[in-house]
Each structure stands twice: as structure tokens, then as C-alpha cells.
Amino acid sequence: MKNGVVIVGAGHGGVQAAASLREEGYDGPVTLVGDEAELPYHKPPLSKTFIKDPAAQPQMLRADIFYSNNKIDLRLGSSVEHIDLVGKRLELGDGSHIPFDAAILATGSRPRELKLAGSDLAGVLSLRSVADARSIRDLSAKVEDVVILGGGFIGLEIAATLTLGGRRVTVVEAQDRLLGRAVAPSISAHVRQRLEAMGIRILTQTTIERLEGENGQLSGALTSHGERLPAQMAIIGIGVVPNVELGQAAGLKIANGIWVDGQLRSSQPEIFAIGDVASYRHVFSNSDVRLESVQNATDHAKLTARIITGHEGHYDSVPWFWSDIGDMKLQMVGLASASDSNVVVGDVADNKFSVYHYAGSRLIAIESVNRPADHMLGRKMLGAGFSPRPETVQAGADALKAALAEAQKGVAA
């Protein structure tokens, strides 16, 4: 490959793709294009430790010297304007071009925009980048009342962090429970109870009708029930949309993201899509998904590097995810959407329990609160395709480990 591989997007997936290409022995040109001026960084801490500590700095994914040592052409603060499929080159915003033999689109996603009166007021923010996190951190030191629109992971992580920092926080969620599209009702109820005990006010089945301000600065939010919430800062956390525009303009197939096959190839075989922007049929659930997690992005990147370097393979990683909300470490493995029964183990009152999800007799997901051992064992079980009986789950970790070992022994035999 004389023109090499170009990677668009310098987040978790993009950086891992560049690293994995070198690890797989690829010796052609590798170019990594990112639209932020910052050296690529970890995103999960932004909603927690970063906005809590005024002295905190971004945690780099790789040291600066990594890129030069591995002959990775890192182009920061650069935008890709167009993919020329005929000429097989990228056109950048500064007018330059990058030729390629293969391209990896790791363009990620962006916060869903709020179409609401007052959304342009100063003090209305969202979180996706370190620049956003700095804005939230700086403003939170000057305000008392914060309204968070959206009861998803990012909104709740920020709510807990700001509450611990002394802010008065109200979370407004349109659905009837927190994390409604992500976790079981029992987890939702537990998270709500813990957050309310911290002092966070939570309004479900509620929306914001408009944001109000004085002299261009946010001063309050009017709910769908007619209540005015005082707020000098509002954080929008109503989901994200995949950044498909570059691929769409190039004629790639779009289906809730950039469509890719089991090898993460788009409808144009020399162009791959990975991470938040990729939509694919997941072998674990046999359904079309677009997953937004560090695990998904990095595992996509590793497989793509193997495919580009001539290896066979299809994406079959078991999905997992985590979130730190106050004193709760939530860890999820598998996809629970098809669950029709579950088993709860542990002590909910002690803030340490897990929910094992089944579809018929098949274990399909485990959601844990402060039970990391359950999560790690769950990853092993789901990775092995092992479904313990519910009574074995209730018998505890030793029984599960023994049953898994016995099942694997049978497979090996």
C-alpha cells in the first residue's frame, strides 16, 4: 500500500487503529487526522474528575513521542471536508489532500441539539470535548443552581459530580425512569434513590418548555408542568447523533450510522467505519446496533487493523460498558434489550448487587453495581457462550466459576 491508511478522528478508536496497525506489522504510511488541537485524550474522566478538580489536565491516550516513534503522521486541528472516492484521497479544510489505499472513519458522535427557546443563552452547555468540560468546570465554580436535561449516563455523572462540589442540581428526564434505554428498572430505581439521597432533585416524565435569561445569561428553566427552576447553568444531555456527514456525502450507505459489514467495511470496501459512528449487525444479539463505548471503539480498531494487514476475522466481541455515578460503579456486559427474565444477587441496600438477564434459558447480559467480580466473571461467561442456570447464579461466584470450568472442560474434550 504505497499511499497507506488514513484515519479520520483522533478519539479512542482512531488512536487505537493507528497503534494496532503498527502492532500488526503494517509498515506503510499512517495518517491520523483530528479536528481538535489537543493531543488525543481519554474522554470518560471529563464528566467526573476533570470537572471536579480545577487543576486537572486531560489524560493523554498516548504520549506525544508515541506518534513520532511509530511514524504516525498526527494532524491535529484539521478538518476533513470531502472523500474523493475516484481519486482515493481526502480533501482537508486547508486545501491540502491526503491520498489513501484504505481509510478508517472514526468520526464519533456529537451531542443532540436542543431545539428550545433560550438554548442560545450563555450558561447552556453540553459535554463532548475537553473544551466543553473546561467550560462546565469554570462556570460551575461561579453558580449555585444547575439544571441537567436528560437522565442518561453523562447527565447523571455530571449531576453527582457537581452535587458533591456543592451545587444544587435538578435532573429533568422525559421518560418515566432514569437510564431508561440502558439498564433494568431495578437499576434505574436504585440509581434514583442514591442520587436523591445525595440531594439531587429528579423530575421524570417532565420536559423543559423553555429556558429563560436576563441580559443574555441563563436564569431559569420552565418545566412542562409549569414550574420554574432557578438555573445559572443548564447542561444538555439528551443523547448523541453519529457524525455520518462525511461518509454520507461520499455516498456510503447510512443506517443509523455508517453501515458496515462484519469486517467493519462500509459499502465502499476500502473505507472502514468504527466506534460510535458505525452501525452493524452484532452477532451477540443478531440485531442492528450502534454502540457508544470505549470498548466498542477500541475493539473495532483492533479488528480493522487486522483486516487491513491481511488477516481474516469478523467482529464478535462481547460488548461491555461502565459508568461511575456518585458512589456507584455501574458495569454492564452483553445486550439486555431482549431480556424476558432476570435474577438479582447481592445486597441492594448495601449498594452492591447484580442483575443477570436471560432470554429464555440464555444468559444475555449482566448489570452490576459495585460488584466488579460479577462483571469480570460475566465477561468470561458471555465470551464463552456459557449460560448458567438461575439457581447456579443464586448459589454464588464459586458455583458459577465451577460450572463455567466444567462447561469449558466439556468443550475442550
Image (cartoon, rainbow, N blue to C red):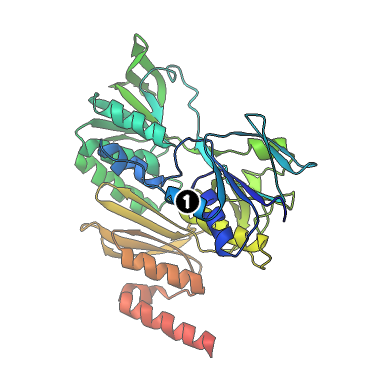
Kindly identify the amino acid type of the residue bearing the numbered disc 1.
Answer: Ser
Label 1 residue SS: loop
Q: In this view, does 275 lie above or below 112?
A: below
Q: Where is residue 344 in the image (x, y as percent from the top left)?
A: 33, 64
User: Most extreme residue toward the right, as rendered?
Assistant: 86
The residue at the point 54 percent across, 40 percent down is 34
The residue at the point 36 percent across, 34 percent down is 133
**One can see residue 122 in this view:** yes
Q: In this view, does 71 lie above or below 207?
A: below
Lateral position of residue 250 relative to residue 34, left or right? right
Q: Which of the two residues, 4 or 253, is positioned nearer the viewer here?
A: 4
Q: Which of the two residues, 399 or 257, is positioned nearer the viewer here?
A: 257
Q: Position of residue 36 (x, y in %)?
A: 49, 35
Q: Which of the two residues, 393 or 127, is positioned nearer the viewer here?
A: 127
Total number of numbered discs in the rendering: 1
Lateral position of residue 243 relative to residue 365, left or right? right
Q: In this view, does 314 lie above or below 272?
A: below
Q: Position of residue 89 (x, y in %)?
A: 72, 41
User: Most extreme residue toward the top, as rendered?
Assistant: 215
Q: Where is residue 248 in the image (x, y as percent from the top left)?
A: 69, 38
Quarter of the view holding residue 170: top left
The residue at the point 52 percent across, 54 percent down is 16
Q: Are there few (<14), some (14-19), or many (20+) residues within 10 Å of tag 1?
A: some
**One can see residue 282 in this view:** no
Q: Is residue 109 above or below residue 125?
A: below
Q: Where's the N terminus, which quadrant?
A: bottom right
In the rendered image, which residue does mark 1 sit on?
293
